[in-house]
Image (cartoon, helix red, strand yellow):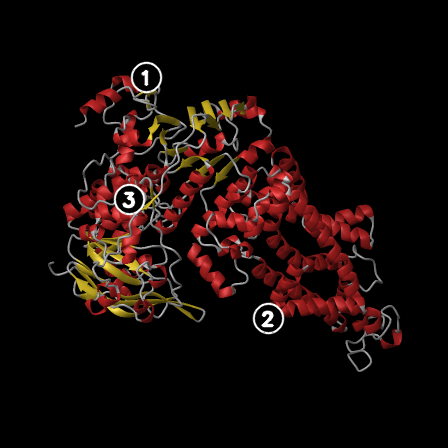
Amino acid sequence: MTKPLLSLRGLDVSYHLDGDVYAALRDIGLAVGPGEIVGVVGESGCGKSTLAAALLRLLPDNAEIEGGEAWLKSRDLLKLGEEDLRRMRGRDIAMIFQDPMQSLNPTFRIGSQMAEAWRSHQDRHARFADFHDQAVKALTSVGIADAAERLASYPHEFSGGMRQRISIATALLLEPAILVADEPTSALDVTLEAQILELLTKLREEHGTAIVYVSHDLGTVARLCDRVVVMYAGRVVEENDAVSLFDTPAHPYTRALVDCIPSRYRRGEALATIPGRVPSLSALPKGCAFAERCAMTRSICREEAPGFVARAGGGVRCHMHDPAKAEFWRVPGRPVTIAVPPVKASIREPEREPLIEARDVRKHFGGASGFIGKLLAGKSKPVRAIDGITLTIRRGEVLGLVGESGSGKTTLGEVMLRLQAATDGEITFAGRKLGQIPEKEFRRRVQMIFQEPHSSLSPRQRVGSILTEPYRIHGIAPKEQRSVDELLAMVGLSADLATKFPHQLSGGQARRIGIARALALKPDFIVADEPTAGLDVSAASAILNLMRDLQQELGLTFLIITHNINLIAYMAHRIAVMYLGQIVEIGPTEAVFDRPAHPYSAGLLSLSSQIDPHDRTRGRLLVPGEIPSPRNPPPGCRFHTRCVHARERCLSEMPILDSAGDDHQVACHLWRHILQEKP
Amino acid sequence: MHEVRRLLMRIVGRPAGMIGFAIIVLTLFVALAAPLIAPYDPAVIAMAKRFAAPSAEHWLGTDHLGRDNLSRVVFGARLALTIAIPAVLSAFLAGLLLGLVAGYVGGLIDRVLTVIADTFLSFPSVILGLALLTLVGQSVLNTTLVIALSLFPYYLRLARGLTLSIRHQPYVRAERSLGAGRGRIMFVHLLPNILPPLLVVVAMDVPSAIVIEAGLAFLGLGVPPPAPDWGVLLNEGFVNVAISIWPLVGPLTAIVLVTTGFTLLGETFRDVADPRLAGIGRRHGRFLMRRAR
């Protein structure tokens, strides 16, 4: 490697909180070459964001940089005075934040906001015309059309994806040599994420900008980064070039992270899990911080903290790779390996009998109602959250529902459970119309697992009381109840959690409690809304294993709503793709993945973040633009505004679901034509 | 009961809570044991000893009719608490229930209730008190009712606002999806979550009620003299302030002290009542809050 642009050595950062010291970062070393993209990955609580903030010295007040040096352009960022530091921020090193909604000030026009960043780096005689030119150039380079006019717009006039582009443009205004991006796509849909990643790659190619990319999503890191640093409990545990790191992970933690990710190729296998949690940074163990959760632990791991063992391309912090300690792992006649053989598990096949059926269901919000409403609202149109959905879910089936935010997935789930009344259409459950089933009975037989693991649990109830709440509501006789211990055991939790409050649980535990509560009444049908959202990969894989086991043992019927395509590919029998309130394609998972017929599903499915650092562009179909407002859906085929294949007919005529094979339906005029075109 | 005792222990465990609690216990004790503590009958007039300065016989001196200032303040605690506490409690209960219903049920009920509350809110409480007391006449009960009426809209507004802010929380939707009815959701799930902030306001409103009551009495419309009401004492003291300041010292100190006591208790209660911050200690709580943000 050529001389690094940014070179970080021995960085130690601690947080001080009323006497306790939290070792947030210890002995971090990092070198970023010119034009290089370095990924920083790890679970939450491992110090990724602290590292990103430390590079710009944007740490909170209670953080203290206790040692180390960070050389950028022959100056040590950690020793600069406030004024020198301010000069370097923005010009030499800039940052992009996670949430584009919050990092732009809503009361400023974006032009003024960008001018602010620019002016602080110019002398007093700087000309506005120069700024204007530079701003237009920066906005154009991130793909904002009519940049000159849009400078006068406010942040709320842009969509989420556009706002993230604007933050990137602001960061690029002074053409910094290095960009620090802290989870820049976590708040965005896969389609927008793919667009932003494309943009970052382009910036590197065109401007030679080096990027430090912090993310918990191994898929995007594998796709984007040249080199990857894996962090655990405030330390770098492994560093390598992206290809070697993902192909042959050396540290057991890296290995486990990679094995946690669900994918269609792991169908019928149990996912790897990492037991336990990241240890508290105020009480780190004497030996290796990962020892308690590691499958390879030997006595030495608990006694001695491992050093960083340099290897080709990087290094690893693990005794196992230290030649001097290797005897601890040597078994006669067998090479040392950290790969865990896959555990076989299968997915139970559904029965033929339909359990729940939706026929031409619609749900419209708002719009004018009543005489006065109509008079006042004038031409206001309703939001068509769901617009004509017909769907059958068989008993014992797992149906995956995917689509971007705003496609109506959650609304459909809630309408099918009668948590929201449908505007139109008919839903049949176990052979009876929804309207004919008494509310109490229906509520006993269907359950929902809500998106938010913590806030879907009543905050002032203890776990035991949360789990028995369904029995109190329905007045179930004690002998027909499952006990709290039994429910906790079903979801793999220990009985002593029963006396805890929800805020005392980790995200994964709270999610399991939500599942246990849903199981208390022995329901037939469960809607799971983003069951792994907000969880670390290790917790997410444990939840998926649990859901698969439950489906297996109890023959539960699931509707899984998610934007995580890997999850669906791993779990679901069938997959339904939604766009703007309609199903555009539905069919068996294998068939839809192998031969996606609708251009939207083809795009969406190709973006699923598989860990594949080898070929970064293969099979990736960017879906351009953003999802239109469901208040005003495009005429004809709703997808035509973003479809590369769109023709005259698509603009005026709405396609209906057409059979594209066994049990496989697609709503597209051109699907035959598109499939034929494919190599 | 066990929970209540633990909560109390945690309140008393903090300096501010301890002080507040001590002041209130002291006030309650003084109010209950007034006849035993007070050195003189608060109503006995001794014209010979008018405006006496503090002395061994009269620790706080005497007023314009020669009555013992200390005894009058001590008996005043009785009146203050028998008016303020029932007034605040009834305002709180009414406001809580109506606010909860308005916030959760919504619709026409919500609109009617908020219009009523806003009508009351649009009058300053003393003016409202003046008007109502003029209509119904002066008495201890009427004063209590009038104070309750002028306070309940605040509780209604607050309870309604808190209910609105949590009624769409995922756990409320989760309860609905389990089949819980309106009553259960309102009283088992929403109520405990909106209660702590309201109780804090209750604790801090007791002194306001005392002040309103004193204000009405000061204006001659509360409890009629010669009752040893703190407001009445202030009124009489101000009239004669040029001659002696001693009649004012007692009621002023009492009002300041009781106000401080209830406020400290209320604030400590607020810090302690939230299970998300409690038990793990203050610093941890703050750490979690920062993490959450």
- Mark-to-mark CA distance, 1 and 3: 36 Å
Crowding at mark 2 (Cα within 10 Å: few <14, some 14-19, many 20+): few
**Foreground residue among A536 and B27:** A536
Q: Which residue is mark 2?
A: B15
Chain of the residue displaying label 3: A
Residue B135 screen position, x and y as percent: 80, 45
Do marks 1 and 3 share a chain?
Answer: yes
Residue furthest left as drawn: A2
Residue A109 screen position, x and y as percent: 33, 44
Q: Amino acid at mark 1?
A: Glu
Instruction: Kindly identify the residue that appears in the image at 63 percent across and 36 percent down.
Output: B111
Q: Which residue is mark 3?
A: A166
Residue A644 screen position, x and y as percent: 23, 27
Label 3: element kind: helix
**Foreground residue among A15 and B157:** A15
Q: Which residue is mark 1?
A: A653
Report whether A170 appears left or right of B230: left
- Mark-to-mark CA distance, 1 and 2: 74 Å
Q: Is residue B150 above or below residue A306?
A: above
Instruction: Kindly identify the residue that appears in the image at 53 percent across and 41 percent down.
Output: B174
Do marks 3 and 2 share a chain?
Answer: no
Q: Is residue A125 above or below residue B46?
A: above
